[in-house]
Each structure stands twice: as structure tokens, then as C-alpha cells.
Image (cartoon, grey):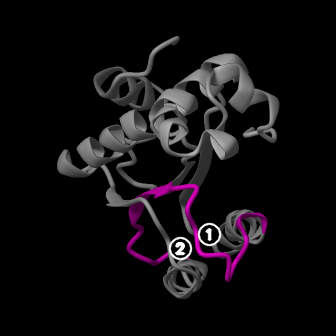
Amino acid sequence: PRHLTSDGAIVTLSRMNVLSTKTDGLLFVERHLEKNGGSTFRHTLERAELEGRCMYWGFSQKSITWKRVIDALRGLNASSALPSVCIEAHSYIDWGLPWLHRLAGLLELRELWSRSGARMKLLTHVRLREPLSMYISYYVWTVAARQANKPAVFGRNFSEWAAVTPNLQ
């Protein structure tokens, strides 16, 4: 869909059998990138928690807590009570554990669960917006207001800012 809504996303995820895991556990990790529909998707995950579909862990995951959660998930087996967890991994993450390291750890979980007989689903999700649309949204969201105070840094308009901005994607 061109525009993501909370209601639409819940319906879509339910049809995909993502958020209705009666006998299986679920670890759903949504990598939130600014200006790519992340806030709307956050509302979807919050609603899923309110409906009892999963426990929502949102916005920021500090390295120490991330390690503890992953260690606990490593111990799941065929006789474990299986959780349903929806994580919104916002782009702000402390860099104690870089994101690629975290992703590798998630993929390792899938292998461990398969060997141990834990009936867990691991789903990862990220959205990327059409580049010009993303840049305009980012500009309106955070840059335009800064230009009045620091035009030498942020430029005087969208074109000047875009010309000196590194690839945001």
C-alpha cells in the first residue's frame, strides 16, 4: 500500500498469520528508519499489544538489555512457554552492539530454535520510502526550521540543503 495506516497494517499482518500465533511463539523485529512510516507502524505494534497479540518493546534497545533478552530467547526449547514479542528497533540504538551484530544474533536464534524444537517464528521487517519523498519529508520534519538559524550549515532552501547532504538512505 502507498500509505500505511495502523488499521490496515494490523489487518495485513493478521492475514499473513504474523500476529495470530496460537501455538507458536513469535519474535517480530521492525527496524524503524526515520521518515519511512515508522511512527505509524509503531502504533500498529502498540495496538497489537493492547489486543494481546504480542508484548511490545519499542523505540530503543540498550545493548545490555538487548543481550539479556537474546540470551533468554536462546534458552527456549520444545517444552518452553513461548513468548510473542514485537520489537520496534528505532534507528537510535546505542552503538555498544552495532545493528548488523544484532541482526546476526537474531538469525542465530532461528537456527537454535530449529535445533531445540522451539516453535518460534522470527520475522524481520523494514520499510524504505521512495528517495525523493523521504528527503522532502525529512527536510520538512527537521531541516526547514534549522535553516533560519544556521543557513551556512543547513542552506537557505531545500536545493541547497540537498546538494550538501550525504545519502540519508
Work out whether 93 lies above or below 64: above
Q: Which residues are magenta?
A: 77-100
**To which quarter of the image does residue 129 belong?**
top right
Q: Which element type, helix, strand or loop, lies under badge 2?
A: loop
Which percent across, then down, holds residue 128? 66, 31
Q: Main secondary structure of the magenta part?
A: loop
Q: Which residue is at the front of the view, 166 or 54?
A: 166
Determine if residue 156 is in view: yes
Work out whether 56 lies above or below 18: below
Residue appearing at x 62%, y 28% in the figure: 156
Mark 2 Cα shell of 10 Å, populated few (<14), some (14-19), many (≥20): some
Work out whether 163 lies above or below 71: above
Q: Which residue is mark 1?
A: 117
Q: Mark 1 belongs to which amino acid?
A: Gly
Identify the mark at residue 78; answer none if there is no mark.
Answer: 2
- Left or right: where does residue 143 sit relative to residue 163? left
Instruction: Measure the alpha-carbon separation of dots 1 and 2.
Output: 5 Å
Residue appearing at x 58%, y 55% in the figure: 91
Q: Which residue is at the front of the view, 128 or 13?
A: 128
Q: Are marks 1 and 2 in contact (CB under 8 Å)?
A: yes
Which percent across, then down, holds residue 27? 51, 58
Which percent across, then down, holds residue 51? 19, 45
**To which quarter of the image does residue 120 belong?**
bottom right
Quarter of the rendering occupied by the C terminus: top right
Q: Mark 2 belongs to which amino acid?
A: Ala
Residue appearing at x 80%, y 38% in the figure: 167
- Asked if residue 87 is among those painted magenta in the image, a careful observer would answer yes
Which of the two labelled residues, at mark 1 and mark 2, occupies the earlier sequence position?
2
Work out whether 145 lies above or below 96: above
Which percent across, then down, holds residue 60? 46, 66
